């Protein structure tokens, strides 16, 4: 992954974590069905950048099933999330609307924790990549200088 892509992944994982927290909060207060929860979130300014969310909501408006639409939208997405991040997002389709409120909240809490761990790992990778790029830049500059002597 390139440095830019690593930083994009960090930004997108922050959005994933925020999305999971928002789903949990709204679910606790509204008990709305999955498509309605996601529709409300897709209308918020900070989630409009989540193309998989916007795409899933548009497809659900035409009557397609939440579970399959959600998975397909994540698979088709060109976002910087890696496979593990995508699997985490896909888990939403396995839990929303499939059990009682307490079970869904517990599962969402686990997903939020996993997202936080993946975010920490992504930040660490982005930092290491930035340090490596800076070091290589300095070394290349020194090599060019030495070759000119």
Image (tube, grey):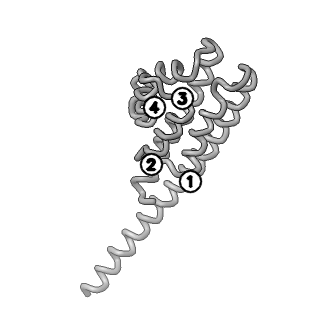
Residue carrying label 4:
56
Query: Is there CB contact under 8 Å for labels 2 and 1?
Result: no
Q: Secondary structure at mark 3?
A: helix
The percent position of residue 9, horizontal first and vertical second, equals 47, 47
Residue mark closest to the camera, 1 vs 3: 3
- As measured in the structure, the alpha-carbon distance from the residue carrying label 4 to the one carrying label 2 is 18 Å
Query: Is there CB contact under 8 Å for labels 4 and 2?
Result: no
Q: Dot 4: within a 10 Å radius of its alpha carbon, few (fewer than 14), some, or many (20 or more) residues?
A: many
Residue found farthest to the top: 30
98 left or right of 69 in image: right
Question: Residue 124 shows which numbered tag?
Answer: 1
Query: Is there CB contact under 8 Å for labels 4 and 3?
Result: yes
- As measured in the structure, the alpha-carbon distance from the residue carrying label 2 to the one carrying label 1 is 16 Å
- Judging depth in this view, the residue of 83 and 119 nearest the camera is 83
- As measured in the structure, the alpha-carbon distance from the residue carrying label 1 to the one carrying label 3 is 34 Å
- Judging depth in this view, the residue of 111 and 92 nearest the camera is 92
Residue carrying label 3:
66
- As measured in the structure, the alpha-carbon distance from the residue carrying label 4 to the one carrying label 1 is 31 Å
The percent position of residue 70, horizontal first and vertical second, equals 52, 35
Q: Earlier in the sequence, mark 4 or mark 1?
A: 4
Quadrant into which the N terminus falls: bottom left
Q: Earlier in the sequence, mark 2 or mark 1?
A: 2
**111 to 119, vertically: above or below:** above
The percent position of residue 40, horizontal first and vertical second, equals 47, 19
Residue carrying label 2:
80
| Residue under the point 37% across and 68% down | 137
Residue mark closest to the camera, 4 vs 2: 4
Residue mark closest to the camera, 4 vs 1: 4
| Residue under the point 62% across and 12% down | 29
| Residue under the point 59% across and 51% down | 121
């Amino acid at each position: 992954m390139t440095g830019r892509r690593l930083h994009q992944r960090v930004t997108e994982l922050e959005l994933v974590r925020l999305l999971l927290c928002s789903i949990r909060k709204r679910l606790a207060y509204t008990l709305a069905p999955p498509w309605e929860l996601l529709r409300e979130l897709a209308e918020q300014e900070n989630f409009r950048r989540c193309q998989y969310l916007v795409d899933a909501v548009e497809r659900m408006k035409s009557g397609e099933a939440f579970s399959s639409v959600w998975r397909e939208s994540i698979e088709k997405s060109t976002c910087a999330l890696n496979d593990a991040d995508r699997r985490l997002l896909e888990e939403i389709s396995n839990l929303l609307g499939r059990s009682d409120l307490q079970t869904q909240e517990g599962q969402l809490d686990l997903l939020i924790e996993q997202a936080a761990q993946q975010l920490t790992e992504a930040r660490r990778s982005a930092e290491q990549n930035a340090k490596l790029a800076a070091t290589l830049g300095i070394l290349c500059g020194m090599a060019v200088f030495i070759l000119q002597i």
